[in-house]
Image: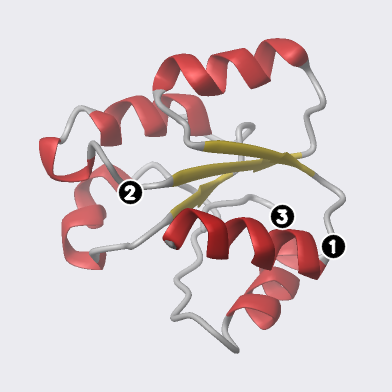
Amino acid sequence: MVDDEPDFLAIARNWLSRRYEVTTLMDGSDLPEQIDALEPDLLVLDIRLPGADGLELCRQIRSNRRFDRLPILFLTASHSDIDFFRNIEVGGTAFLTKPITRRTLLSKIQELLS
């Protein structure tokens, strides 16, 4: 999970770590290099990040054939239709907006992993 809000990362980690192994990053700039070692089953990205934004990270990850089918969930405070459609253009699998409930996040992740 990549998000630049430490409070949200702590809450989401608490919600998810009961069922999943969770790695959190506040900056995704090293993610394209780290992703091979992390071997994720799913990636959760914020759109607005320092450095490379979530959309650019998704584009970079999708260019790696090993991860072209990896579920990528955009979880963002942006309610913009433009961001929703840009998510699709870069290869995002799903798009949810903050604030979000534990139940909604877990349900979407379970759906993407099944």
Earlier residue among tags 2 and 3? 3
| Residue where numbered disc 3 is placed | 5
| Residue where numbered disc 2 is placed | 31
44 over 54 or under it: above or below = below
For residue 76, what is the image quadrant?
Answer: top right
Closest to the camera, between mark 2 and mark 1, is 1
Q: What is the three-letter code of the residue carrying label 2?
A: Leu
Secondary structure state at the residue bearing disc 1 = loop
Quadrant in which the C terminus appears: bottom left
What distance separates the C-alpha of mark 2 from that of mark 3?
17 Å
User: How many numbered markers are drawn?
Assistant: 3
Q: Are marks 2 and 3 in contact (CB under 8 Å)?
A: no
Residue drawn at point x = 16 percent, y = 57 percent = 36
Residue 45, percent from left and from top: 54, 45
Q: What is the three-letter code of the residue carrying label 1?
A: Thr
| Residue where numbered disc 1 is placed | 101
Q: What is the three-letter code of the residue carrying label 3?
A: Glu
Q: Residues within 10 Å of mark 1 (few under 14, many from 20)?
A: few
What distance separates the C-alpha of mark 1 from that of mark 3?
16 Å
Residue drawn at point x = 64 percent, y = 32 percent = 48
Residue 27, percent from left and from top: 50, 49
Residue drawn at point x = 49 percent, y = 80 percent = 20
68 relative to 15 in the view: left or right: left
Residue 94, percent from left and from top: 57, 38
Q: Residues within 10 Å of mark 2 (few under 14, many from 20)?
A: some
